[in-house]
Amino acid sequence: MNARQGQAAGSRRGGSTVLQAIRFIVLCVGAVAMLFPLLWMVTIALKSNNEVFQIPPEWFPRELHWSNFVTGTREIHFWRTFGNSLVIAVLSVVGQVASSVLVGYGLARLHFPGRKLWFSFFVGSLMLPGFVGMIPLFNLYSNLGWYNTWLPIIVPAFFGNATFSFLFVQYLKTISVSFDEAAKIDGASDLYVLTKVLAPMAAPVIVTMVIFAFQGSWNQYLEPLIYIVDQKKWTLALAMASYKGTYATAWNLFMAADLIYILPMLLIFFFGQKFFMQGLGSVNSAGLK
Amino acid sequence: MKNALTSRKLKEWRNGYLFILPSIIGFSVFVAYPLLSSIYYSLTEWSGYDKPRFVGLDNFKYMFSVDPAFWPSIRATFYYVLMSVPLSLFFGLCLAMLLNRGLPGIKWFRTIYYLPTVVPSIATLTLWLFIYQPQYGLANSLLRTLGLPEGTWLTSEKTALFSIVLIGLWQVGSGMIIFLSGLQSVPYELYEAAEVDGAPRWRVSLNITVPMITPILFLQLILGIIGAFQAFNQVQVLTGGGPNFSTSLLNFKIYQDAFNSKMFGYAIAEVWVLFFIIMIFTALTYRYSNRFVYYESDNAR
């Protein structure tokens, strides 16, 4: 509601045509600067290796070398690595979203002693720098025999994500408690209320969580770097980071592989743009409340 | 009747704890345990394989007076935070203000500016590694085409850190969206009132828009500071801390000391120093925020 009002307010105060034009031009220049690195990447990925190292450079490839995508992805054992990343991402998403939804429901809807205390612990832990736990946890996982496995990356996902729980709590606040009460009078359990009554109504925030959890997992670098030595277990992030060193001479292949690594995120972005924006918007409301 | 009530209450208590159990376990194991145990580890010499040996404050003494890499890395970290946080906030806010009002193609602009933040961190950094490559990279090719002198980018200690900051500005889109949603929730009545009073445009921006979004600015500032102090990937992928320690951010040094040099006790001591610095910065920001952060009602906090 508010958002629409603000926008309407904005367009009415759109300003003089000259100012509008200046604004448009500034935005165009900025947009070109934003897109240029990505477009350059695409042109390199389609060039032959000789063309890449040509001086002066030609901006566009003379012939399109689509085969770079095949060769480039083979160099990083793409399908294996992609599979690894995908398995890790799916499990992390399921774990984080499921556990955060449970925790969020408990914190938002159930009354029990210590609720506020735990809530402040969870939210407070967001302020802690992530690396504080890095070394003791490394030691813990090594003692459990989890070194060089995916477990240190996947298992913690199932024990709640404070940001997501917080988002879910905030969202549940916008849904009237009378829905819960009506179901409970009919004898429904808490789990039923959560999964059958509230979750469908909270679908937008759950989708946002899924997207951000996937993005987080696809981006993750430090943990895999610390824990996974065996190349066969590498994720795409690890493979790309080491590829840049080993094959620094074949830029075209590298860029092709890098583009394929980005592709899933781009697809999610184009189909789920709304949820990205919503999710970031709710970061706001979280901060304001 | 009373019994039934208490048993229902007890059931709710039990269910409450069952529902938040994942996070209680998560908090205890992944937050509290490492936090508390690392207080002890920071006072030990520990290679990660053998038993930690208690050495008192020796780690800190070594850090402050012997380790030749410590102060340069503190310096780099401060420079990095002081450059990257204000710059990203400034550009994020400017972009949001430009994109807040109606304009042809406004949706496209928003999408384009947000797009770089979708690119995974490692893909971004490896891409920029090639962009900054002195001979064939995009940056210098572009400068040559325009007839400008070439840049040294990551190869000189004068420019390396700033080049890393620049990559962060390419990803200013997420901050922009957060500011944008804040701008759009500024009540219309305020603008209307200003219009009736005939206030000039710049006054409207300065006296209405900016104060109304200071709470968001404040939150972004805190999160930005915490995030910037923890920068790691950039250094690991782009420079390895060089040239001459100019990009050796503390978090990267901690990683190296722990996992390359196997000085776990020492690295944990460094973690505590970094943690302490972050706390001071956050506390100072909180303290001075009262002066500039505007809350609509006092009890909104």
Image (cartoon, coloured by chain):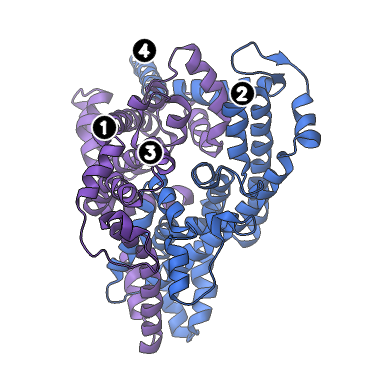
Chain colours: A purple, B blue
Closer to the chain start, of discs 3 and 1, is 1
- Between tags 3 and 4, which lies in front? 3
Q: Amino acid at mark 1?
A: Glu
Mark 3 to mark 4: distance in Å? Answer: 58 Å
Helix, strand or loop at label 2? It is loop
Residue beneath disc 2:
B262
Query: What is the chain identity of the residue bearing mark 2?
Result: B
Say above or below: A65 vs B63: below
Residue beneath disc 4:
B3
Question: In the figure, is residue A288 to the left or right of A191?
Answer: right
Mark 4 to mark 1: distance in Å? Answer: 21 Å
- Between tags 2 and 4, which lies in front? 2
Quarter of the picture containing the N terminus of chain A is bottom left
Say above or below: A18 vs A245: below
Query: What is the chain identity of the residue bearing mark 4?
Result: B
Is disc 3 in the same subunit as disc 1? yes
Q: Amino acid at mark 2?
A: Lys
Mark 3 to mark 1: distance in Å? Answer: 47 Å
- Between tags 3 and 1, which lies in front? 3
Is disc 3 in the same subunit as disc 4? no
Helix, strand or loop at label 3? It is helix
Residue beneath disc 3:
A237
Question: In the figure, is residue B31 to the left or right of A231?
Answer: right
Say whether residue A200 is visible: yes
- Between tags 4 and 1, which lies in front? 1
Residue beneath disc 1:
A181
Residue B48: x and y in percent read: 59, 17
Q: Residue at x 43, y 36 (%)?
A: A221
Q: Quadrant for residue A63, please give it.
A: bottom left
Query: What is the chain identity of the residue bearing mark 3?
Result: A
